[in-house]
Image (cartoon, rainbow, N blue to C red):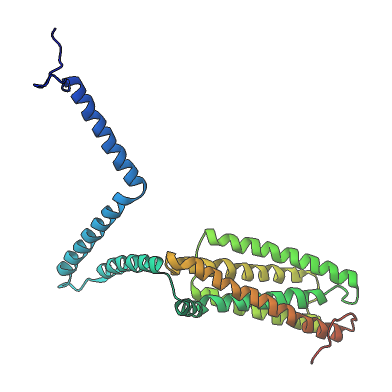
C-alpha cells in the first residue's frame, strides 16, 4: 500500500509531509499569538522604547558635535531637555513623593494658588457682602432681593463665557495675576457705589458680568497652566492641592462679607444686619 506515511525501524509511524507542514503552521500561529499577547501587556514596547531612547540620544549627541562649531545648540538643548524630562517624570511616578517633597511641591504652587485665592476672596465678598446690600431703592427688601438675583445671574453668564476660554487658549501667568488685581478694583468700586450712590441703577450689571469673566478666567486658566507646566506624574496632586486656595478664599470672603454688608446697611439706614459694623 502506497501512502505518504513513513515508519522508523521499530515500526512506529513517523510524521507525514502533510502533518509536518500543519505542525509548522501551528507553531507559527502560536508564536504570533505570543507576540500579540506580549504586545498587549506592553512588554515589546518597553524594549522598543528603550532602544528608541538610546538611538535618539545618540543622534542628539551626533547633532551636538556637528553644530557645536557653529554655536547653534538651541534645538539640541531642547531635545536633550525633553529626553531628560521623560526620564525624570518616569522616575517620579515610580518612586513617588515623600511627605517633605509633597510639602515643597504645595509651596511651589504659589504662582497659581495666590491668584486663585485672591480672585475668589474678592468676588465672594462682592456677592455676599456688597450685592446683597444694593437695591433701587436700597431701603426696599424686595428691590435688594431683585438686584441680588439679577447680579448673580449676570455673574454666572460671565463665568460661563470665561470658563469656555480654556478650550481656546491658555493665558500667561502675567495675565492670570492681572485678573485678581482687577477683581479687587471691582470690589472697591462696588463698595464705593453702594456707599455713595453716584452710579446707582441696573447698568451695574455690566460690572457684574465683568466680575464673572475675571473669576471664571482665573479658575480655568490657573488650572490649565498647572496642567501645562507640571509633569504628568505631578498634575493630579498639584491640582488637588491648588483647589484648597479657592476654597479658603470663599470661606474668608463669607466671614468678611458679614461686616461689609453691616457697614453698607448702616450707611444707608437699613436694618437687619447680622453683625455690627466695626468702622
Q: Residue at x 43, y 65 (%)?
A: 233
> Relative to the observer, which residue lies in front, 221 or 230?
230
The residue sitting at the bottom extreme is 279
In the depicted structure, whether residue 216 falls above or below residue 98: above
Where's residue 113, x and y in %?
Answer: 55, 76
Whole-percent x, y for residue 155 in the image: 70, 66
In the current view of this chain or complex, which residue is farthest to the left? 9
Quadrant for residue 202, please give it. Answer: bottom right
Q: Residue furthest top?
A: 1
On the image, the x and y values in percent for residue 179 come to 59, 75
The residue lying at 26 percent from left, 53 percent from top is 48
- Say left or right for 94 vs 279: left
Question: Taking the image as drawn, is residue 146 in sight?
Answer: yes
Residue situated furthest front in the rendering: 10
| Residue drawn at (66%, 64%) of the image | 158
Quadrant of the rendered structure where residue 49 is? Answer: bottom left
> Which quadrant of the figure contains the N terminus?
top left
Instruction: Write down the quadrant of residue 80 in the picture.
Output: bottom left
Residue shown at the point (62%, 79%) measured from the top left = 118
- Of residues 18 and 115, which is closer to you in this image? 18
Q: Is residue 196 visible?
A: no
| 197 sits left or right of 83 in the view | right
Screen quadrant of the C terminus:
bottom right
| Mark count | 0
> How far across and down, in percent of the image, does residue 14 sit?
15, 22
Q: Is residue 100 above or below residue 13?
A: below
Amino acid at each position: 500500500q502506497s501512502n505518504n506515511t513513513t515508519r522508523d525501524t521499530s515500526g512506529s509511524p513517523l510524521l507525514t509531509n502533510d502533518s509536518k507542514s500543519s505542525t509548522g503552521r501551528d507553531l507559527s500561529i502560536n508564536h504570533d499569538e505570543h507576540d500579540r499577547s506580549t504586545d498587549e501587556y506592553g512588554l515589546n514596547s518597553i524594549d522598543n522604547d528603550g532602544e528608541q531612547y538610546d538611538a535618539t540620544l545618540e543622534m542628539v549627541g551626533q547633532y551636538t558635535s556637528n553644530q557645536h562649531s557653529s554655536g547653534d545648540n538651541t534645538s539640541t538643548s531642547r531635545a536633550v531637555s525633553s529626553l531628560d524630562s521623560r526620564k525624570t517624570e518616569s522616575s517620579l511616578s515610580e518612586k513617588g513623593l515623600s511627605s517633605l517633597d509633597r510639602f515643597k511641591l504645595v509651596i511651589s504652587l504659589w504662582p497659581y494658588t495666590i491668584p486663585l485665592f485672591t480672585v475668589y476672596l474678592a468676588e465672594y465678598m462682592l456677592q455676599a457682602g456688597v450685592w446683597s446690600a444694593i437695591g433701587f431703592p436700597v431701603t426696599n427688601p424686595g428691590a435688594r432681593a431683585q438686584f441680588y438675583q439679577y447680579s448673580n445671574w449676570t455673574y454666572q453668564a460671565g463665568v460661563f463665557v470665561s470658563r469656555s476660554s480654556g478650550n481656546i487658549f491658555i493665558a500667561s501667568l502675567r495675565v492670570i495675576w492681572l485678573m485678581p488685581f482687577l477683581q479687587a478694583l471691582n470690589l472697591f468700586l462696588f463698595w464705593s457705589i453702594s456707599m455713595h450712590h453716584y452710579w446707582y441703577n441696573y447698568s451695574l450689571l455690566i460690572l457684574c458680568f465683568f466680575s464673572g469673566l475675571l473669576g471664571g478666567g482665573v479658575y480655568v486658566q490657573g488650572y490649565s497652566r498647572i496642567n501645562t507646566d507640571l509633569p504628568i506624574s505631578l498634575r493630579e496632586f498639584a491640582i488637588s492641592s491648588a483647589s484648597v486656595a479657592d476654597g479658603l478664599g470663599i470661606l474668608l470672603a463669607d466671614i468678611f462679607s458679614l461686616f461689609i454688608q453691616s457697614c453698607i446697611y448702616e450707611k444707608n439706614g437699613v436694618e437687619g444686619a447680622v453683625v455690627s459694623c466695626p468702622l
